[in-house]
Structure formats: C-alpha cells, structure tokens
Image (spheres, grey):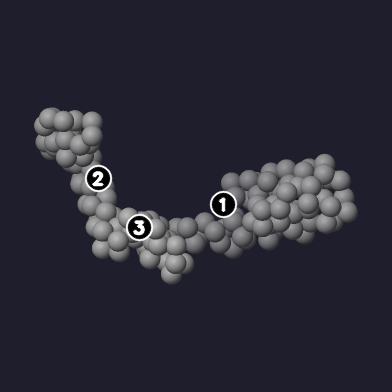
C-alpha cells in the first residue's frame, strides 16, 4: 500500500491535502497518467498550441493528441487486418455494401440508388453482412 495525496491528482476537487492509502498498482497507474498529462501540457506550451494553428502541417495535432504506443499500434494493426480478412470472406455484394456504408460513409439510400435496388434490400444485406462478420470474428478467424 502506498499513500497518495488526492490534491495532486484532483486539484479542482480537493482544495486541501487529503492523504489516502491505495494499492501499489493504482499508485503506479495514477503516477503514469499524471506524467502523461504533464508531458501533454508541456507539448502544448512548446508548440504554442494554445493558439489556433490551422496550417495543416500537423503541429496542432501532434501537440494536442497523445499517440498510441508501439504495442497499441501493433494491436490495432492486427485487429484491422483481422477485420479486413473477415470482410474478404463475405459474399461480394455484402462486402461491397458494407464497405460503402461503413468505410465510405454512404447512406443506405444512396447505395440502393447506385445499385438500382430497394432500400430494404441494401439494409437486409448489411444486417446479414454484420451477422456474418460477427460469426467470423467470434470463431477467431485466422488468415
């Protein structure tokens, strides 16, 4: 058990020092979050991101958003690859409609109009595609 001061982590909620005992893992997690937040605000000050930097060169984005670690990026890539592999196992129409709706952001009406089919046909196809994806992914699809 480790003693921490809640005022350090929640300065707006605690005006006076308030010491409590927490497990070591919780104290470690709180310290890590505290350092990440301090680093985040340091980047904002360094890049002067408290002004609008709508230049499009990425300075504002880099200073305002915390980037995932290498491990998190790898997990996201594996999840994305698994999703794409599952989509490739769908029937062609289902895969096309699912991609158009969720990845390209097309409405069901627009997809139906482009393909010359009814709204309900596209809607039903999307529901079947979602069901098939859920089945593929729950079985632990390998690629």
Secondary element at tag 3: loop
Residue at x 23%, y 43% (from the top left corner): 30
Q: Quadrant of the C terminus?
A: bottom right
Vertical placement of 25 versus 76: above or below?
above
Quadrant for residue 9, please give it: top left
Q: Which residue is mark 1?
A: 140
Of tags 1 and 2, which is closer to the observer?
2
**Label drawn at residue 13:** none
Tell me: 99 left or right of 67.
right
Q: Residues within 10 Å of mark 3 (few under 14, many from 20)?
A: few
Looking at this view, is 105 or 15 the one in front?
Answer: 15
> What residue do we see at 66% from left, 57% from top?
104
**What element does badge 1 sit on?**
loop
Q: Residue 28, image x and y in percent?
A: 20, 45
- Residue 23 visible in this rendered orientation of the protein: no
Is residue 61 found left or right of 17 in the rendered image?
right
Instruction: Name the N-terminal-most of marks 1 and 2.
Output: 2
Q: Quadrant of the N terminus?
A: top left
Secondary structure beneath dot 2 equals helix
**In terms of image quadrants, where is residue 24?**
top left
Residue 3 at x, y percent in the picture: 11, 36
In the image, taking residue 43 as reference, residue 111 lies left or right, namely right
- Disc ID at residue 29: 2
Task: Name the residue tied to disc 3.
Answer: 51
Image coordinates of residue 45 in percent, x first then y, are 26, 59
The residue positioned 82% from the left and 41% from the top of the image is 120
Q: Mark 3 or 1, which is nearer the eye?
A: 3
């Amino acid at each position: 058990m480790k003693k921490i001061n809640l005022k350090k982590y929640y300065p707006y909620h605690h005006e006076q020092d308030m010491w409590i005992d927490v497990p070591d893992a919780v104290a470690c997690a709180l310290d890590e979050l505290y350092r990440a937040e301090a680093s985040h605000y340091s980047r904002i000050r360094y890049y002067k991101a408290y002004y609008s930097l709508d230049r499009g060169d990425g300075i504002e984005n880099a200073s305002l958003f915390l980037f995932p670690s290498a491990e998190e990026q790898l997990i996201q890539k594996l999840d994305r690859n698994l999703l794409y592999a599952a989509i490739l196992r769908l029937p062609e129409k289902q895969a096309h409609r699912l991609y158009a709706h969720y990845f390209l952001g097309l409405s069901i009406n627009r997809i139906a109009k482009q393909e010359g089919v009814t709204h309900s046909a596209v809607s039903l196809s999307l529901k079947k595609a979602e069901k098939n994806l859920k089945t593929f992914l729950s079985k632990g699809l390998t690629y």
